Structures are given as C-alpha cells and as structure tokens.
Amino acid sequence: MSDTILLSAIVFLPAVAALILVAVPGRQKELIKQISFATTVLVFLLTLVLLAQYFELRDPATGSWPTLAERAAAAREQDLPNDLVVRYPWISAFGVEYYLGVDGISLPLVVLTGFISMLAMLASWGIDKYVRGYCILFLLLVTGMMGTFVALDFFLFYVFWELMLLPMYFLIGIWGAPSRVEADGRVRGGPYAAIKFFIYTLVGSVLILVAILALYFHPAEPGAGPAYTFDIMRLHSIAQQAGVYSLGFQLLIFVLLYIGFAIKVPVFPFHTWLPDAHVEAPTPISMILAGILLKMGGYGFIRLAYPIAPEAAHYLAWFIAGIGVWNILYGALAAMAQTDFKKLVAYSSISHMGYVMLGFGVWTLMGDPDKWSMAMNGAMFQMIAHGISSPAMFFAVGVIYDRIHHRDLNRMGGLANIMPYYAGISAIIFFAGMGLPGLCGFIGEVFTVLGSWQFSRLLAVLAASGVILTAGYILWTLQRVFLGRPSPEMFGEGHHGDPNALPDLSVREWVIAVPMVIMAVVLGVYPDLVFRFMEPSVTQLIQDLTQTLAQAR
Amino acid sequence: MNLTEVFEVVRSDIGSSLRAFLPELALVATILVLLLVRLFQRQGTYVSRALALIGSIVALLLALEQYGAGLHREIFGGMLAVDGYTHFFRLFLLAFAVLMVWLTMLTNMPEPEDAADFFVLLLGATLGMILMSSSIHLLMLFMAVEMASLPSYGLAGFLKESRRAGEASLKYVVFGAGASGIMLYGMSLLAGRFGTAHLPTLAERIAQSVATEHGVVIEPILVAGVLLVLVGIAFKVSAVPFHFWCPDVFHGAAAEVAGFLSVASKGAALALLSRFVLTLAYPVLQAFGFAQVSLTQALALTLAVLAAVTATYGNLAAYAQTNLKRLLAYSTIAHAGYMLMPIAAAIGSSGRPNFATAVDVVLFYLVVYLFMNLGAFAVVALIRNAIGSEDLSHYGGLIHRNPLLTVAMAVFLLSLTGIPPLAGFVAKFRIFVVLYQTGFYWLLAVGLANTVFSLFYYVKVLRVMIIDEPVPETPAWQSNALAVAFHVLLIVANFALLIPGVWNGLQDITTGAVATLLLP
C-alpha cells in the first residue's frame, strides 16, 4: 500500500466515517456505535500496518533507519511510495504543503492514539444521550489527534491542533457532568470545564501561531530574505546552522512554544484546566484527554520547541527541569489531598507528566550526552507508559462510578471482597501508574531520574522522592477503595442498593481493561518493544541538538 | 478646467462611460421597473422579488463580463474609476444582493404590500454602495455615501409596527446626517485648499504642498480635512467612537436588514476608506521614497489605534448582550476593527512591498466575512420566524428542534471566531501575517488577544443552543429545500478555503483587484 494512502487514511478515515454518520438516522444508536467502533478498530489496525512498514524501512545491513529529515528531503524531489513521507503542494500562496510523515518519535504516539481511541470508543457504549453527535465529534477528535502527530507542515500541524479543540469542548460540555451551583455560589460542571479547557488551549494556540509567523518570516541564512517556510524539517535544518537564529530570537520562539505546549501537558502553573476537565468529562473522554491530548504537549516540545530553538532550550534547561520536578511534587501532593477519586487521578497525571518535562529539561554540555539521551528516551517512554496507565486508571474510576454514582473516596471501601476481579485489575493498573518495577510506569521514571542525575543531583533526588509520594497516595487510595468494610453511604444521592450485590466487571469492561493491563505488563517487562524503534530517532535528535549547540559555542 | 471644457470631456466619452456603467444601469432599470410595477400591482411579493432577483442577477452577469474584459479607466470625466478594485466590489456587492433576495425568499421578509418598496431600497442602497467603491471625486463620493445611506435609513425602519425599528431608523438618520455633515465639511476644506475635488489630482497637489523647499510642511487644514472625512467614513464602518448607532440600529431593524447593513454597508465603507486613504497617501509616500513621513505615520497610527480600540471594545461589549442581533452588532464592530488593522499597516509599512498586500487582505477578509456574517444573521432571522424571539434565553437547546440551523450557526460563529479549518481563520491569519510583516507587533498582539476575547461570547451562544436544556414549547422551524441549499452553500463556503486551489484563487482575485487600483 502506498504510504500516501496509508497515512491519509489513518488521519482522515475517522472524519469520513463522521460524515457518513451524518446520514445515519439518530435513532439507530447501536448501528452508530458499531460504525464508530469499527472505524477506530480499522484505524488502529492501519497504525499497526504503519508500524510494520516502518520496520521495513530499516536498513538490514546496519539496522539503522533513514532519518525523517533525509526522507523528507528526498520526498521534496520525488514522492517515493514507501518512505512514509507524504508531500504535496497545498496552498502555494503561502507555500503550505500537505505534508505528513512519521519517525520513531511520532510513531509510538500514533499507535497509542489508535489503541486508546479504540478502547475509549468501546468504553463509550454506555453513552445514551445524543449518540450520533457524540460519535461524530469523537471521530473528528481522532482525526485531529492523528493529524497533529503526523503533520510535518507547521500550518497543517496548527490546523489539526486546533481541530481538536471544538470536539473536545462539546464532548466535555454536553456529555460531561451537568452544570451545577456549588455551595459557595460558583458555577461548576461540564460546560464550565469545557470553556475553561477551550480558552486555556486557545491562548496557547495563539502564542504558537505567533511563533509560526516569526519562523516563517525569519531568514534562512544570515542576511538573506525571509525563509517563507512552514516545513518543520526545514526549520530544524535552519536551526542547526550556527548563527541563523540568534539566542534572543530562539528565546522568543521557545517561550512562545513553551507556554503553548505547557498548557497542554499541563505544566504548573498552566495546569488548572486539567482537574476541572477530567472531573467533569465522561469516562471515555477522560481516557482520551489523559492518554493522548496531554502527550501532544510533550510531542510539541520534542518535535518543535527543542529542535527549532535548541540554544534557548539549553539556556532554560534549569527552568524546564525545575518546573518539571515541581510538577512531580506538586501533582503528587495535590493528589494526596483529594477525596474525589477522579480528581486524584487527574492530579496524578500532572505529577507523571512532570517526569516527561524533567527528562526533556536535563540537558547539559558538561558530562555525558548519553545521559541526556537516556533521560529523553525515558521521557518519551513515560509518555507512552502514562498513555496506557492513565486511561486505564480513569477507566477504573469510571467502572466504580457507573455502579455507585459518586466518586467520594471516603464513601467507598471493601470493594476487594465485593468485586474481586475489578480489584485485581485495578491494583495492576494503579501499580503501573505508581511505577512498580515490572510494570510500564517504572521504566520511564527510572530512566528520567537516572538520566537527570548528572544534570543535578538535587533534582534527581527530589524527582525520586516523588515516587514515594506517588506510592503514598496510590496505596492510600487502594486502601480506601478496596480494603476495609464497605461504607454505609456507599451509594450516591438518589441511588440505593446493596453494596454487597455490586456486579463485578462486565464482559465489555473486561475487553477494555485487559488490553491495557497486558500492555502495562508487556511494556514493563519488555520495554524494548517500543525502544527498538523509538530510541534511534530520539538518539539521533539528541546528537543533532548537541552538535548544534557545540557549533554555536 | 472651465465648465465648457468639462462639458466637452464628458460629452466626448459619454458613450464609452455608459458602457462601462452597464451593471449600475441595470440596477437603475430594475429600480424603475419595480416602481412602475408598484403602480399597477399594489400587492404581492412574488413579482417584485422575481424582478429584484432578475435585475440583480443581470447586473451581476454584466459586472462579471466587464471583469473578464478587464477594463481600467476613469469614466464620466473623472467622477468614477472603473478598475479592478471597482470590478471586485461590484461583484461582491451584487453577489451579496442576490444572496439577500434569496434570503428574503426564505424568511418572507417584506409584507406583500411593501415588497416593491423594500426591494427598491435594497437595490438602491446596493447601487449607492457600488458607487462608494468606485468614486474618485469628492463630490461623487459624498453623493454615493448619501445614496447608500438614505435607503439604509428606510430599511432600518422597515418593520412598521415596531417602535424599536422607528427608533433605530431615527437614530440612524440623526447620527448619519451628523456624520455626513462633518464629512462634507472636511471635503470642502480639502477641495477649497487644493482647488480640485478629483482625488488623484488632489493627491498630487497634496504631495507637492507637503514637499516644499523648506522641508516637509504639513498644513493644519490638510490634517483637519483628512481627519473630518475619516470621521464620516468611520461612522459608516462603525469604528469606535463613532459606533453608537450600530447596536441600536441592528437591534431595531429586522435581522435580514441588519445582515445587509453589516456586510454591504461596512464593505462599501471599507472600500471607500481604502481607496481614499491609499490614493491620498500613495503620492506622498512615493515622493519621499517610502521614507518615514510623519503625515502618513500619523495617519497610520490614528487608524491603528482606531482599529485596536474598535476590535477590543466590540468584543468586550458583545459579551454582555442577550439579544442576538445586538450581540452580532458588537461582533460586527469588532470585525470592522480587524479589517481596519491592515489598512493602518498598509500606510505605516514604510514602503515594503506590502502596500498592496495589506489592502488585498481586507478584500479577502470581506469575502469571507460575507459568508460568515450573512449566515449568522440569516440563522437569527429564520429562528425568529420559528420561535418569535431573538433573545438568547429562548435559544436553549435549539439543536434538538432545529439541528440544521444550529450546526450552521456553529459553523458561522466559529468561523467568526477564527478557528481552523474554517474560512474565518484563514482571513484572520492573513491579517496577522500582514501585521507581522509590517512590524505592527502591538497591533498583532491586540488582534490575537481579541481572538481569545471573542471566543467567550460566540461560544456562549453555541453553549445555549447546544448544551443547555431545551426551552419547552418552542416550535420547530420548518425547513425547505431552498433554505437547506442556502445554508449548505454558506457552510461549504466557510470550509472551502482549505480545499486546494480555492485559497490561491481567491487571493489571486483580490490581489488583482488591488494591483489595478488606479493610483495617481
């Protein structure tokens, strides 16, 4: 299959399915869900085909891959059928291209997106309100996410990046919790959380847009005219020439992109939308948010901010790493203080994404560049691992919420006896999130912390101590939910029942949980599954960046 | 030139002038026929509407033919210019007139006994607006503004039973007359000081008077004249602080009329503004080799501040509105602000090749603005027909009763916000590009911040329509094929710019229109 069709299908198949759904009568709820699920399964299978094709690209003699930059440059001359880069002119007035491509950095995220979208769609079976609208928006969201990960034209990237906002707004606003007035008079609920998410992200997007314009008009060589390019690979190569982007310019670009992406990650102090959005969103949307949307921020750093403004990134290394560690500790402490199960998981996401920022940040020219490579690889792996463990955690919260209609940790308890399978599955999932060795969360954390040791022992120690806090809140949570006796107030207002008669996992819930549990274990014991194709690209990037910086000095 | 000479010039080219004036003549003929028909047939909407539709389509086709022929010259002895710029606005306004007539078909806007009057006013205003875009003579310019304004006053008060409409019309007249007076005064200062009312000649004489042997001399009378004319135009554009009429007029007038005024009237005023400002500034900039000229810099700064304040005020004031027409009125004020930004950048750009690009961007924006703003007002009109209210509180849960209208409204409002992949984003993106290129960073920051501000109130409307609980017992709107086609057309137009070739095509058209602007 030609790569043009493959990549385009992965991105646009969901959008086409959404268009088809417009024609399906809204009463046919089952049919609509089946079409949507089939689409997400197909997209996931296509991402696996993409992965297989990527392995075919490998040079059998050396075992190395041609870099994305090389393939992109070749595609500029001639579109090869199997180079996994798609390049066609699109808007010639601005030199915008329809330009997609994958490498070891984007590919794991693409596969993850396919995987989580599929499971989240399956988790959406319980949605009964306006099913057609839900599925249409969900599929558009998938298109936006896939497009963001594979776009190599900055303009196209921006279009996909923004395309996600609107479906997300409505998915949280309509299918999230209804609007309510809190005891202190504040209005909270889905619509509030949705607009908060929308505005935070739009502010970030606007800053990214400024960076796009600034890069577009910046000369490609000293003294030359404006570069007039949105080509991300070209911007990388311009940035690699010493003296083209001055440190001041790089700082401007980096700060703009930093804020834009940090809002998405989310990095303290731009994180406040996240607990709201997660708590109010329906379970499948929380899975998508935590599993994929947060990764877009991290992806933005590694694909755009770092390669385009390397000097600035190095200049601000302490700041980035320091805020990352603060994210770890702050998120963990905030999680510990929560009594709302879902909010706790939301803060744990903030904490875990801190490791990603720490891994990115610990760049020092003093010492061994392999250590930074290790940290960066760890950060990337942490993104994948968190992309599996956090949707699983949100799913676990959703399972119990569906049964008892509240999320107050103090009113649960004893579930291990009542729902033993649920308890077992949840334990694995939460331990994966905690970073227990043998599960996926461990690898990313240990790599980032080890990699950051040479940068700063203090930060490494603080980050490692975050593991203790994480263990603290996760174990305490498991204790409150599963151990002890069932709380007498087990059921939410207006709901009654016998706590001991709570049903265990349904078949559908098994089907959703088991793949995530399997992946958590597999990635924990065999991380090479991802590292094998991710590590060469990340290491290549580190080499390029280090070289660029060495030239600039 | 004495009177006989003028007469001789006019007589000698009257034939070719009239030929170049054919689209306008077609409109005039339609208006006359409409009035005649009214004498014989006192009732009935169909005949008048059909005539108006045919007349505007014929005029549109004639304009298209002339656009294809690529005629560029002054006609009627230097009263009007027929250049690419005129062709563009002719097509823009006539196509808009056709869409307006189509819209009235959907909303049954004029009562049967008033149908002829309504279409006469509509086409008359359109004619005036076309003249606004093509006049290059101060006197003609003033007459064109009046010709566009007077029918607009009538249209604003067209809902006869409504006190609000009467009030709107009266306010419009009073403010409009005041603005016209000020504008006329400014023109008389310019014409009196420089001895000509022909804009290109005037511009050359201004350039001469500015560049004296004692260096740059700027006469107070010149500043006063230009500023007073700008006040008049700012009123038509509804730029802050001359915007007071806009919310009241839009609130009182029918939604269709408000849609018409918001697009056509503003479009024509911006056409006039660009032509006036560019024609006057160009020779001055040229004479000084596009160096920093304090006069043009001051003019640019004035416009930039005006634009920034207008956009910000419009967006902030819109947030508090509960009446949809009023909310959209403030939104149109904000958009006028966005459209003023590149014009300011054009004059202030100190001669980088952006002089034409900046105006090109405004034309581009106007085309996009037509599709998004007309759409929004059309939805308001159709919902008013269905539920009898334009109040946001009655819009709750409309998606369940009127899914097409709600989805259409979502597309239009998000396009107005400037969210990709909708056309509004592309238009805004081009404005931001010009602002970045010309170094107006602070204005760029204002524009970007305004995008975020505007999200609040546009999404507020969508939230009420889509997320909130339905208002009980609101009747559903009965759709029909024509209405569906109308909305599908506008929705597709809002997505079309990202189809390969469309963006380039539109940009080529607008660039061509500006490139052939007859500058002295």
Image (cartoon, rainbow, N blue to C red):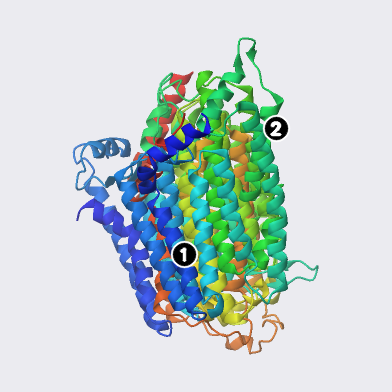
Could you tell me which chain the residue with mark 1 belongs to?
Answer: B
Residue B69 falls in which quadrant of the image?
top left
Relative height, residue B427 to residue A485 (above, below): above
Residue B73 falls in which quadrant of the image?
top left
In the depicted view, which residue is nearer to us: A361 or B418? B418
Q: Position of residue A13 (x, y in %)?
A: 32, 63
Classify 10 Å Cα crowding around label 2: few (below 14), some (14-19), many (20 and above): some
Seen at 61% across and 27% down, the residue is B194
Q: Where is residue A523 in the image (x, y as percent from the top left)?
A: 41, 55
Q: Where is residue B55 in the image (x, y as percent from the top left)?
A: 40, 64
Secondary structure at badge 2 equals helix
The residue wearing badge 1 is B32
Label 1 amino acid?
A: Leu
Relative height, residue B295 to residue B122 (above, below): above
Residue A520 falls in which quadrant of the image?
bottom left
Q: Can the viewer see residue A307?
A: no
Residue B224, label in figure = 2
- Tell if the residue under mark 1 belongs to the same chain as the one under mark 2: yes
For marks 1 and 2, the one nearer the N-term is: 1
